[in-house]
Each structure stands twice: as C-alpha cells, then as structure tokens.
Amino acid sequence: MTSQICARCDKPTHEPIVVAIEHSASAGGRTAYACPSCAPSFPKQRDPIAEIAAMRRARQQGWIR
C-alpha cells in the first residue's frame, strides 16, 4: 500500500489503517487513514448496510413498526 497521511497526527505512514469512510451527497467520499499508533484512538465506525439489514429483520419479526 502507498504511504498515507495520518488523520490524527498528520504524519506520513507506510502502514495506513482505514479508520473512517466519509460519504458525501454532493461530491465523492474520502477515506481517512491513521498510523498504527493513532488508529486505536478513533471510534469504531458503524456499518450503515448492516444497520439497515438489522432494521429490516426487526420489522419482519414485528419488533418495530
């Protein structure tokens, strides 16, 4: 993988870890990278597709309307 800039410390890293995928309606999204030492400080990202699937299953089971 190519070198990326850490989103936390702004230093280049040769071992980038994806910490966020940002979506935008008006423009393309972007991927935020962090170095291995800063990556644990980022919150875990929620998966919107998994949340939609869980909501659909809950509706099918009658748990929510």
Image (spheres, rainbow, N blue to C red):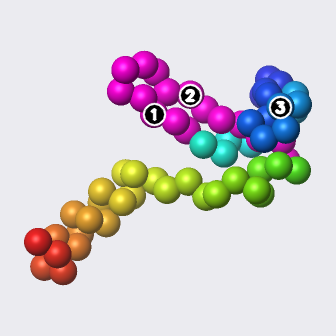
Per the image, the residue denoted by label 2 is 30
Residue 29 on the magenta segment = yes
Residue 57, quarter of the rendered image: bottom left
How packed mark 2 is, by other alpha carbons closer than 10 Å (few <14, some 14-19, many 20 or more), is: few
Give the mark, 2 or 1, whose residue is nearer the N terminus. Answer: 1
- Helix, strand or loop at label 3? It is loop
Residue 8, quarter of the rendered image: top right
How packed mark 1 is, by other alpha carbons closer than 10 Å (few <14, some 14-19, many 20 or more), is: few
Q: Which residue is at the front of the view, 3 or 26?
A: 26
Q: State whether residue 37 is above or below residue 34.
A: below
The image position of residue 58, as x and y in percent, is 22, 73
Per the image, the residue denoted by label 1 is 23
Q: Which residue is at the front of the view, 1 or 12?
A: 12
Q: Which mark is residue 10?
A: 3
Give the mark, 3 or 2, whose residue is nearer the N terminus. Answer: 3
Q: State whether residue 7 is above or below residue 54.
A: above
Point out the stretch of residues depicted in magenta. Answer: 21-36
Give the mark, 3 or 1, whose residue is nearer the N terminus. Answer: 3
The image position of residue 11, as x and y in percent, is 88, 31
- In whole angstroms, how far apart are the C-alphas of marks 3 and 2? 16 Å
The image position of residue 36, as x and y in percent, is 85, 47
In the rendered image, is residue 27 in sight? yes
- Left of 55 or right of it: where is 45? right
- Helix, strand or loop at label 1? It is loop
- Which residue appears at 64% of the width and 57% of the height? 43
Quadrant of the image containing the C terminus: bottom left
Between tags 3 and 2, which lies in front? 3
Amino acid carrying label 1: it is His
Amino acid carrying label 3: it is Asp
